[in-house]
Image (cartoon, helix red, strand yellow):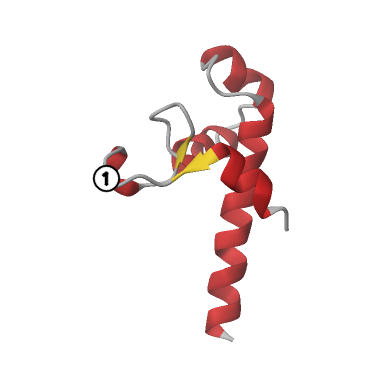
Amino acid sequence: MDTAAITAHIALDPQVRFGKPVVKGTRTTVAEVLEMLANGMSAADIEEDFPAIRAAQVRACLLYAAYRESVVLQAAA
C-alpha cells in the first residue's frame, strides 16, 4: 500500500474538522469524498465541483479508506 500518497494528500489536524482526516489544503473530509464516490460521482465530477480537490487526492482518499480497513481487519484477526 502506498502510504506516501496518503500522507502527501491527507491531513489529520485536531484544529480542523475535529481531527477528522481531510484533503490537505481543504476542509473536505475523506468521508465526504468517499460519500461523493459512493453516490456515483467520478473523480472528474468531484474535481469539477471542488476545484481544490484533484484526482490524485481522490485516489488518496480511497487509499486511506483501504488502509484503515486493512488495519482493522488485521487487528481483528
Q: Which residue lies furthest to the right in this view?
A: 1
Question: Local crowd at mark 1 within 10 Å, few (<14), some, or many (≥20)?
Answer: few
Residue 31 placed where, x, y %? 46, 43
If the image is split into quadrants, where does the N terminus sit? Answer: bottom right
Question: Quarter-wise, where is residue 5 in the image?
Answer: top right
Left-right relation of 32 to 41: left
Where disc 1 sits, the SS reads: helix
Q: Is residue 23 visible?
A: yes
Q: In the rendered view, tell whether residue 45 sits above or below residue 36.
A: above
Residue 61 placed where, x, y %? 58, 42
Q: How many marks?
A: 1
Q: In the rendered view, tell whether residue 69 sits above or below residue 16.
A: below
Q: In the rendered view, tell whether residue 48 sits above or below residue 72.
A: above
Left-right relation of 40 to 17: right
Residue sitting nearer the eye, 35 or 16: 16
* Residue under label 1: 18
Left-right relation of 38 to 30: right
Residue sitting nearer the eye, 76 or 11: 11
Residue 23 placed where, x, y %? 49, 34
Query: What residue lies at 43% left-to-right and 27% top-to-bottom?
Result: 26
Q: In the rendered view, tell whether residue 76 sits above or below residue 9.
A: below
If the image is split into quadrants, where does the C terminus sit? Answer: bottom right
Query: What residue lies at 58% left-to-right and 51% top-to-bottom?
Result: 64
Query: What residue lies at 63% left-to-right and 24% top-to-bottom?
Result: 54
Q: Is residue 61 visible?
A: no
Q: Which amino acid does label 1 sit on?
A: Phe
Question: Quarter-wise, where is residue 17 in the image?
Answer: top left
